[in-house]
Structure formats: structure tokens, C-alpha cells
Amino acid sequence: MKRVDDFRLRFGNEEYVPIMIGGMGVDISTSELALEAARLGGIGHISDAMVEDVSDRKFDTSFVKDKTKLYKHNINNMDKSMVQFDLQRLAEAQRLHIGATMKAKQGPGLIFVNCMEKLTMNGPRETLRTRLNAALDAGIDGITLSAGLHFGSFALMADHPRFREAKLGIIVSSVRALQIFLRKNAKLNRLPDFVIVEGPLAGGHLGFGLEDWKDYDLMTITQELLAYFKEEKLDIPLIAAGGIFTGSDAVKFLEAGAAGVQVATRFTVTKECGLPEKVKQEYFKASEDDIIVNGVSPTGYPMRMLKNTPAIGSGIRPGCESYGYLLDATGNCAYINSYNREVAAHPNDKNIVVMDKTCLCTHMRNFNCWTCGHYTYKLKDTSFKKPDGEYQMLTAEHVFKDYQFSTDNQIALPEKEF
């Protein structure tokens, strides 16, 4: 019976353990988690979601404080169109976050950064250009384009000296999405170095409809993409993602022709993950019925999360003056519309309830939006329940090696710490 370690992910002449840890924001996929993946010969992701806030926490910078002070006069204004990001400071935060991670890298693996197109930041094109090029400046090994179609993202980097050196890839959920991406970028004569196919059981934002995501299957989409690659004679590594819970699950995709797998759920309860320990315990304790897919994200994408996440039903005032990462090109956000609607309907209420959308910036920043993968309810089977009712935390190395070496759908339990 084969193990994941019997396969290798190849980029040119270089080979890696075919395990990629997904880029969970905001700083849930920490530098420490990504560094462990790289040390062990795989690929780790960090995320640049809300990178100015991440920088403030890691490097004692004052990006958020200074932005809040600059736009403090606008806090009670329903119109947020004036709230802009300083591109120079955004680039500085990106270079700090990524540069420090790359400086600390050891081992034979790689570190990528996950860049979401849906972080439109009241200047979709220029803020994305800044983030992408600053990541290349900072020496990132690769960039994964996510949460969007990214028709113009390669062009935003085309003049950078590392445009053809760094590994550049995209997350898709269908053959059609990839076809359009390739067609839009054909004139650059630059194919993606990898493609991640993300199925309907993934955590966080999903590339499917709110009502029809159950109609899709990762293996089917993977095979459709592999057939398309063969038909078009495209030699691009395909990484399967979403619902791959064991090493045996991974082997099925590797045997089917995938070059690697991207995994995340099992790493949410590791010591290196950025979630607070109390939230990790919520993940451990979750049942299958506790996991839902809803439409509360202002991005317009469905999102999977725990149904007891504090972000659902919260009516906090939009924090755009401090954050504003989801403001569209007109300075608007779906949560602002919902919040203003509820304020108008309940002008005398002190506690506003907004059920249809959530302030994703503020709640992700405070770890109050508990996004998760479909198989989160299985996490309790990967560790030990302690006498006090809490579960023992795992290490990233333990989980990584379990994926790498396990067989027969077995999960290696950690050494007891109590």
C-alpha cells in the first residue's frame, strides 16, 4: 500500500514532499506553521489577508493605528469611499511579514503566500498590484492567487524581475475557470507553475454556489482538469484540495494523477496555528451538525464555518477606518449596506443584529469568524481528550508526518502529554 512519501511534487528539476499547507488568514496559517512545512520538505503558505494588522502584531508597527487616526473623523459617516490604503505603507507591511518569514526559512521546502483577489481594499487593481510585487520583492518562493478569477493578476506582476522566477499559481474549482484564466493571460507567454483545484468540502470561501455546492465532487473535478491538461498538452502540476483528511485520502488523488495535495483543517489544531487555543477547542468539540455553509461573507462567496461562530448575527459598526479590506472599487461593502439597513429599521436599539452579512474584517481580525473545513468534526479522532474535557494540542510536524507516512486510512495519535 502506497504512502504519500512514495510520491514527489516536481517543479522542474526540484522535488518536494507533495504536501502543501493551505494559506488560512488572518494569520491562522502563521509563519511558524509555514516554516515547519518547508523544514519538512513540503510547501507552506502564509496569507497576506489584513497584512497591516498582522505586521502590527508581529513587528510592533502602527499601520492600523495611524490609518484609524487619519480617518477617525469619518467613523460615523455611512459613506466609506474616502477610506484609502497608503500603497507605500501597504508594501512596507507586506515586505516585513514576508521578508521575516523567508529569512527564517530552513530546510528543503518552499513558502508561498496566498493572495485573495476579493480583498479589494477600495482600490482593487492598485492594492493587489502592490501586494503581489511587494511579495516578490521580499523573496517569496511562490504566490497562490485565490478568491477570485484573477484575469489581470499576472499582468500586474509582469514587469517585476522575479515574474518568471517565482512559482505562480491559481486556485480554481472548474475547468472553465482555468480556461478563462489561461486565455486572459495568453499574451504574457507565462503559464502558471501550478494549479490548485479546490473542491466543495474546503474551509472558508468556496468557489461554488450557495445552493449547489453539494452537487460537486473533488475527484471528479480533478479528473476533468487532468483530462484537460492532457488534451492541451499542458505540463502543469495539479494540486488537489478540500476534504483530504488522511494520508490515504491524499494517495487516492496522487494515484489519480494529481501532483500533490493541499491540506489545512488538521493543522488548525496544531500549536503553530494562529487560532487562540479556546477556538481550537471549539474545532475539536464540533459535531457534523455544527458545520454549516452560509452566505454571510460580504465577498459574495459561500463560506463554511461553525454555526456557533460569534460573527453570525453580530451587528458591530463597520470598522473600515481601521481596516476596510473588503471595500469595493466604489468604497462600498455588502455588510455596510446590511448594517445601515438594520440601523434605519431599529433607530433606538443599542444592540444591532445583522443576520445576512458579517463584518468579516473585524471578526477575522479578532478570531471570531470560525471558518472551517467540512471534516472538522473528525478532529476529535486525531488527539486525546484530557481529564478536564479539553483536547491535547498537536504539533505541525506530527500532522505533516502522519499525512506523509500513514496507510490504510489510519491516523497516528500523538504521544500523550498528560
Image: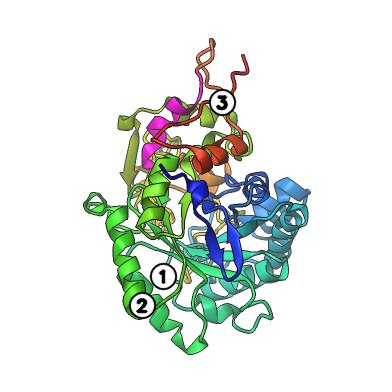
Mark number, residue 149: 1
User: Where is residue 370 drawn, in percent x and y?
Assistant: 46, 39
Residue 64 position (above or below residue 119)? above
Depth-wise, is mark 3 or mark 2 nearer the camera?
3
The residue under label 2 is 180
Answer whether labels 3 and 2 touch (C-beta < 8 Å).
no
Residue 139 position (above or below residue 353)? below
Q: Which residue appears at 35% of the width and 59% of the height?
A: 207
Q: Which residue appears at 72% of the width and 50% of the height?
A: 56
Write down the region rendered in magenta.
Answer: 371-384
Depth-wise, is mark 3 or mark 1 nearer the camera?
3
- On whether residue 412 falls in the magenta region, the answer is no
Viewer can see residue 372: no
Q: Residues within 10 Å of mark 1 (few under 14, many from 20)?
A: some
Which quadrant does the C terminus fall into? Answer: top right
Answer whether labels 1 and 2 touch (C-beta < 8 Å).
yes
